[in-house]
Image (cartoon, rainbow, N blue to C red):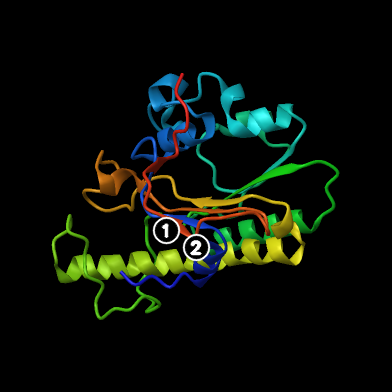
Amino acid sequence: CDVPTPNLGQLASEGTLFRQAFCGAPTCSPSRAAMLTGMTAHQSGMLGLVHRGFHLSDPARHLACGLRAAGFETALAGVQHEFRPEELPLAYETAFRPATGDGAEADDLSAAAWAAEFLRQRHSRPFFLSCGFIHPHREFPAAGGETRREHPVPPPYLPDHPAVREDLARYGDAAARMDRAAGIVIRAIHDTGHDRDTLVIFTTDHGIAFPGAKCCLSDAGIGVALIIRPPTGQPRRPETDALVSHLDRSE
């Protein structure tokens, strides 16, 4: 599927594109918990989704909690899926949640605008900013024509059927919306000079929401996008096919 994501393309050209990156679990909360605690889902206690009653057995192991304890300013814009609402103050000093909460493009754009404003502010301490977007989560937007509809060829784990091709095109439109929101943040990083002193990481939490991918313990289910952009002037490798994982340590 030819997805128009020029802003992420620009970020990849400035950093390292990881072509063989994988998450710690094929569903949202367990995957995010693995990435942000360095522990497997069963070690962290996050065996299922937060909004279905699961939670971190030790929230202090979350990256944002550790950085906050170390003196970092911590901020959240948009989506997270590791904490219940009452737990957020443990990790983030400030948090912005979009007004509608219904997955509209306006939610992602408002989260991106808030993150950009945070970047423009003066900060007396090093900071950790997490900016999460709902797109391209289902439900995908109605057909809008941003993705080439002549017609995206399905991956090998999906049948080649007109309905599947249409669904993939709608997925591409959702990804394009996410890219617009990401572009707001990326431009703010450059405009404020934080490109010279900030490590930027873009990733996804699991595979795309199609049969055989998300929720399945397969390459398609745990394969993720990953771009890491070091501060300007630092050495980088343009791209790599080395196998890497969100799960960087196990205890």
Q: How many marks?
A: 2
Q: Quadrant of the N terminus?
A: bottom left
Looking at the picture, how far across and down is residue 15, in whole percent? 55, 58
- Tag 2 secondary structure: helix
Cβ atoms under marks 2 and 1 closer than 8 Å:
yes
Label 2 vs 1, first from the N-terminus: 1
Left or right of residue 23: residue 221: left
Q: Is residue 134 above or below residue 186?
A: above
Q: In the image, what residue type sits under mark 2?
A: Met
Give the numbered dot on residue 178: 2
Q: CA distance from mark 2 to mark 1?
A: 7 Å
Looking at the picture, how far across and down is residue 127, in whole percent? 73, 43
| Mark 2 residue crowding within 10 angstroms, few (<14) / some (14–19) / many (20+) | many
Looking at the picture, how far across and down is residue 184, in whole percent? 63, 66
The one nearer the camera, 225 or 135, is 225
| Mark 1 residue crowding within 10 angstroms, few (<14) / some (14–19) / many (20+) | many
Left or right of residue 60: residue 214: left
Looking at the picture, how far across and down is residue 195, in whole percent? 70, 59
Snapshot quadrant of residue 80? top right
Residue tagged by mark 1?
136
